[in-house]
Image: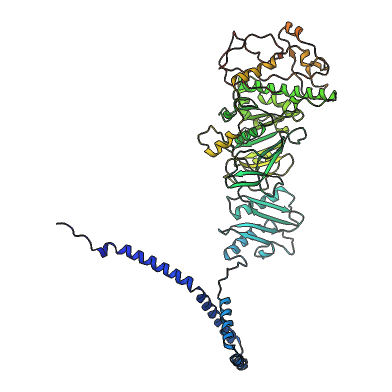
Amino acid sequence: MARRPLPRILSSGSAQIARSREIARTAADSATDVLQPLITVSRGLRKLAATARAKWAATPKERRGPTLLLVAACVLVVALVPYGPLLALVTLMGAAAWKGRERPVVKSGPDDAEIARLKGLYEALVPYFSVPDDPAPLFAHGGDWSGAFGEYAFDEDGRPTRLRIAYPPYFTDGEPAARARVEQLLHAKSGRGREYHFDWDQEGNLLVMSVLSALPTTIAAQRFVTVPGETVLGFTDEDAVQRTVPVVAADGTEDAPAVVWRTGPRSAEPHLLAVGQPGSGTTSLLRSIALQALPHGDVLIVEGGGTGEYACLTGRDGVLAVECGLSGALASLEWAAHETERRLIAANRARQAGHPAPEDTRRPLWILLDRPGVLGHLAAADGRPDPQELLQVPLRHGRAAQVTVVVAEQFDSTDTLSETVRSHTRARVVLGPASAEQIEAVLGVAPHTTPTPQVPAGRGYARLGTGPVLRLQVPATPDPYDDATSEAHRQAVLALLPERRTAADAVAVETVGFESAGLESAGLESAGFESGGLESAGFETTTLKTVTVAAATATEAAPASTPDAAPAPTPAPPRHEPDVAPLAPVAPVARYEGEPAPRLAADPGPAPRHTPVAAEG
């Protein structure tokens, strides 16, 4: 038996009801808009009537008669005046419209929940800001909290965002431990998960606690408006620094307060140490520094982690080498030490002769060392010297030679840092989640804010020399070859990379440094240096390695140098190119003791792992 369909009125009844409700709602809204003046006047008349009734109820009985007579006389006068009733009606409607208008509610004080929270904070601070011998204590159990809290503000959740506390003069605000106890209490009672700033006014006995907003993470790597010798480490709060730089963020162009690190001969903190947790952004910071240094100098990168984070810089113009292995790292750092010594000798000889420093000694050289603790462990297992020992000369004398060293390490390996690295890296950066004790151990002083357990990558603190501790957000500079990198950030980093050199150009530049030979051509014997040392040049801690001659015939053929001649540029670390045919045999050359000699055509050797790089000075 076939089922009969439902009547149309039952199948479409719900749709008609919904449509009818929508029409009725629209009509009600339209009527409310049209009748809004009448509603306002009615509300005002009701309020005026309520006010008149309250006045009449508050009038004593013996004065009600004269008051009623006075009102009747006023009504009679208005009725007898021409156009009096009309004017009285217009006045009444105007007063009703003014009285019935909707006015925003102005909050004049804290509500009950906020008062309860302020009382809780006051009672919690009593043990810290009171003593039994105080005759009129500002903080006392059951006392008045309004005298101690002069200014306060709350967010939507009822948590305090700003609080000004007046404390007694006998509180030991000069002791860091006493201040830390109060800050820890306020942090716990005001709500965790936020970053608080504590401003102690020791002269006025005032403490201002405020909640800091998160630093923007929308600024990516780009060309910053700086001069040579300035590097943007990141961005901080607006009231923390006076320097701003125009940047392109996700929401347009803006002026952002930047943490600018100055290097060079007149810098008080020529070298930098960055410490963080894995994934905190120390590698991105080094990559950002390298991209900013390449337009004006040369960069030598030593990566101890061996993760290939700097593969995008291999073979680029200005990048001398990107070393990932122990042998290449030792050779490159040894070359960097020799190059620093050569620059010092050349600059000193030029000053003695009354000439400006040579051009090749004024071009900045950047040594970026990522995770040296791993390389030191491998060197100790292999019985070879620690790579950090080769940084003594660049760290101690690098400022005068335009050599800058940047070291990045993780918290669990900070004990492997040498004393030379710790004492000469006066610019410090801490990235990632860290406790106040860890931050103080790296920066030298405790931060002025409460560190949060969850922070984005590149978020941390910076301190340049003896300056204040600044909050820092490193510009996003991810590895462009990483699949997890967003397309916008990948294109931003690729746009900053210089052109990649060809293999033929690299080999041609590499062979230039090995063409001159002999002791006199290096200019060391005529300068009067004893055993190649720097004592006569005014440097007391560093000694040049003894220069040996590879062949006697090369020494005899070398032209004699004049007393004012500058030492020849130190050749770059010997490199090999797998895609280029072996070079033809060349004449024996002078080289540093312990430096590997260039390979000849008869012995090409094993396949190299690195791309040859150019040496400029």
Q: Nearer the viewer, residue 99 or 270?
A: 99
Q: Quadrant of residue 186?
A: bottom right
Tell me the residue at 33%/65% (across/down). Answer: 17
User: What is the x, y in percent for residue 249?
Assistant: 60, 44
Residue found at the far left of this picture = 1
Q: Name above or below for residue 455 compared with residue 579.
A: below
Q: Is residue 32 visible?
A: yes
User: What is the x, y in percent for residue 414?
Assistant: 64, 33
The C terminus sits in image quarter: top right
Q: Name above or below for residue 213 compared with residue 568.
A: below
User: What is the x, y in percent for residue 261?
Assistant: 70, 38
Relative placement, left or right, of 499 versus 23 is right
User: What is the x, y in percent for residue 358?
Assistant: 77, 24
The N terminus sits in image quarter: bottom left
Q: Name above or below for residue 27 compared with residue 587.
A: below
Q: Quadrant of residue 480?
A: top right
Q: Is residue 539 visible?
A: no
Tell me the residue at 60%/61% (across/down). Answer: 117
Q: Name above or below for residue 143 compared with residue 466.
A: below
